[in-house]
Image (tube, grey):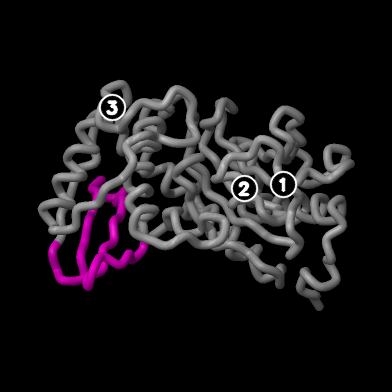
Amino acid sequence: MSNTTWPELPWNAWSDTAATLHMWTQIVGKTRLALTPLQNHWWNVPLYVTARGLTTSAMDYGDDVLDIEFDFLSHELRMRLSSGKNETLALKPRSVADFYHEYLRCLDTLGAPVKIWPMPVEIQNPIRFDLDTQHHSYDPEYAHRFWQVLVNTEKVLRSWTPGFLGKVSPAHFFWGSFDFAMTRFSGRPAPPREGADSIQREAYSHEVISAGFWPGNGGYGAAAFYCYAAPVPAGLAEKKISPAAAIWDSNLGEFLFRYDDVRLQSSPEDALLDFFQSAYSAAADSAKWDRETLDRKTA
C-alpha cells in the first residue's frame, strides 16, 4: 500500500475546535436523522467522507433532493438542492448557538426547513444548540488535518473490506460519538445489553466487531485507532495482536493503536491494516465466529 501523509493531530492543540465541530456535525447529522427512514443499526444517520470533507449524502425533501457537506478545504458548509438552489455557511470561529441559528436560516432560505431536536446526544453535560455559547472555536488547519486522517483511514478500511464476506457496514462517521467506524457482523443476534438505551439496543442488536478511529474525545485524550467486539467474548483481553505497539485497554475493553504510534511506523497504512486484521481475528476467534464461512479465502 502506498505511503500517505499522516499529519500531526495532538488532542490538546485542537480539542476546543473538535468540541465545537462535534456540535456542528450533530446539528447537520440530526437533519439527516429527520429526513431519512430508520435503517438497521442507525445506518441512516452517519456522515460520509468526500473529496473535500463530510457529507450527509442525498436526502429526499418532498419532490427535491437535499445534500449538506462540510468542506474542509474552503471551510464552508454547503447546502444544495437538486433544483439548483444552494446556500453556504462559513466555517469559522463562531458559537454553536450562532451556527445553529444561521444554519436554520439557510435551510429556510432554501425552502427546505427542517425541525430537529436541539439537544446534543452521547456527551456529558449537554447544552442546547440554541443556547451554547461555550463552544466557539474553529481552527481551519486542524479541521483540515482531521479530515485528512479520515480520508487515510477510509483508504485502509476499504483495503480491509474484501477479506470479509459477511454483512459489513460502510465506513461512516457517527456524529453522536464523533468517531469513524466500519463494523462486521457474525450474523447472530446478540443478547440484550443491560441498561441499554434505544440507540444502543438498535446499534448492538447483533454480534459485531467494529474498527475505526476517534480523535481523542470521550476522555481518552489522544487520537487512536480501535477495534472492539460486542458482546466482549471471554479471553479477548489475553489475546496477542500486532503490531507490537497496539495494546488492550482494560478501561475501555478494546484494542487500541495510538495515532502517534501509527505515524512512527515505516508504513502507517500497512501497520494499521495489520492492526485491524489481527484484532478482528483475535475477537472473531474468541467469540467463535464461523470464519470458515465469513472470511474470504486467499491464494
Question: Viewer-proximal residue, 260 or 218?
Answer: 218
Image point 43% across, 27% down: which residue? 15
Q: Mark 2 or 1 closer to N-term?
A: 1
Question: Within the magenta stretch, is there residue 257?
Answer: no
Mark seen at residue 136: 3
Contact (CB < 8 A) between labels 2 and 1?
Answer: yes
Question: Viewer-proximal residue, 40 or 160?
Answer: 40
Q: Secondary structure at mark 2?
A: helix
The residue that mark 2 highlights is 201
- The answer to whether residue 200 of the structure is visible from this angle is yes
Question: Within the magenta stretch, is there residue 80?
Answer: yes
Image quadrant holding the C terminus, namely bottom right
Q: In the rendered structure, which amino acid carries the disc numbered 1? A: Pro
Q: CA distance from mark 2 to mark 3?
A: 33 Å
**Where residue 151 sits: x, y (%)?**
47, 54
- Residue 58 lies in what quarter of the image? bottom left
Mark seen at residue 192: 1
Image point 58% across, 40% down: which residue? 197
> Considering only vertical position in the picture, is 262 above or below 51?
above
Q: CA distance from mark 2 to mark 1?
A: 7 Å
Q: Secondary structure at mark 1?
A: loop
> Considering only vertical position in the picture, is 99 above or below 106?
above
Q: Mark 1 or 3 closer to N-term?
A: 3
Q: In the rendered structure, which amino acid carries the disc numbered 2? A: Arg
